[in-house]
Image (cartoon, rainbow, N blue to C red):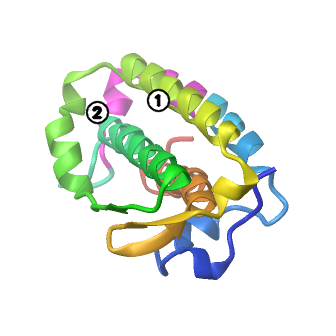
Amino acid sequence: MITKPQPGEYAIPLPGNYLELINDNEDILTALEQQRDTSYSLFSSLTESQANSSYAEGKWTVKEMLGHLIDTERIFAYRALCFSREQQDLPGFDQDVYVYFGTYGTRDIQSLAAEFKAVRDANIYLFRSITPEQEVRTGIASGYEVSVRAIIYATAGHERHHLNILRERYAIG
């Protein structure tokens, strides 16, 4: 079982804000599996009209939010892979640029939901392969030191953060 990271293993506020959304006694791998299933079910049940909506002018559509989850999931997994093997310095990323060039609005919600599920499945395999020695290894991401287990927990917390926004601001979920 991957244990929850300690405050010295990540930069404040991020991914600290995401880690606060994970209970101390949660099995993070089980949580990631449950999220995969509930998020896939939620997103794949949306109509194209719902998926193309946003809660305010200039805010991401639901499709763009899901695309952002997919992009971030891939980046977090890459960081966890790299840091579990050797300490490295990896760059940050501009989420708005990624969403803009992701052209998520041109895709149907079913395709995006299936892609999210496939990416999460691959990442669960990766995260399950992380040894106790590897989970505490660190690297530099966006200029801050972070442990592998902090990245794994941030993956689940990041999704919870956006699902909360989906419920509160989009009235979905």
- x, y percent for residue 77: 48, 44
Q: Name the chief secondary structure element in magenta.
A: helix
Q: Does the rendering let one see residue 57? A: no
Q: How many marks?
A: 2
Location of residue 129 with respect to 85 vertically, above or below = above
- x, y percent for residue 133: 70, 57
In depth, the one of 88 and 36 nearer the eye is 88
Q: Is residue 46 magenta?
A: yes
Q: Dot 2: few (<14), some (14–19), or many (≥20) neighbours within 10 Å? A: some
Mark carried by residue 150: none
The residue shown at (46%, 29%) is 116
In depth, the one of 18 and 145 nearer the eye is 145
Q: Does the rendering let one see residue 173? A: yes
- x, y percent for residue 99: 23, 44
The residue shown at (59%, 53%) is 152
Q: Nearer the viewer, mark 1 or mark 2?
A: 1
In depth, the one of 135 and 28 nearer the eye is 135
For the record, the magenta segment spans 39-54
In this rendering, position of residue 127 left or right of residue 60: right
The residue shown at (34%, 37%) is 67
Amino acid at the residue labelled 2: Asn
Q: Earlier in the sequence, mark 1 or mark 2?
A: 2
Q: Please give the residue where the numbered disc 1 appears in the rendered image.
A: 116
Q: Please give the residue where the numbered disc 2 appears in the rendered image.
A: 52
Secondary structure under tag 2 reads loop
The residue shown at (59%, 63%) is 137
